[in-house]
Amino acid sequence: MSVLCPKCHLPFTKQIVNREAAKDYSHEAEHFEGTRSRPYSVDTSKTVVEFVHYCKCRHCGHEWTETKTVKFDA
């Protein structure tokens, strides 16, 4: 996420007005075949949540949305 306003491009004027969870899903664990450096590499399952941030510029008042994805270990 950027700290710049996309309209006036002033730094550190972005303010998150509201945040809500857009969707969540589960990333299933996958088994990887080993290599010489990691013979037993295994992916872990994770819960993935996408958040929508409603942003507003403190300087010019421009409003926009940003999506952020967060992965949690299950």
Image (cartoon, grey):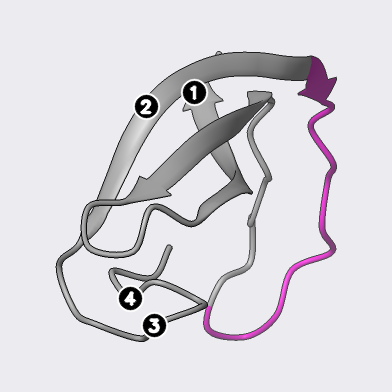
Q: Amino acid at mark 3?
A: Cys
Mark 2 or mark 4: name the one nearer the start of the chain. Answer: 4
1 or 3: tag closer to the N-terminus: 3
Quarter of the picture containing the C terminus is top right
According to the image, label 4 marks what residue? 4
Identify the image quadrant of the N terminus: bottom left
41 falls in the magenta region: no
Q: CA distance from mark 1 to mark 3?
A: 38 Å
- State the extent of the magenta-drawn residues as a range: 24-37
Q: Is residue 35 located in the magenta-colored stretch of the structure?
A: yes
Q: What residue is disc 1 on?
A: 73
Residue 31: x %, y % from top left: 83, 45
The answer to whether 23 appears left or right of 58 in the picture is right
Residues at marks 2 and 3 touching, judged by CB atoms closer than 8 Å: no
Q: Which residue is mark 2?
A: 17
Q: Nearer the viewer, residue 13 or 48?
A: 13
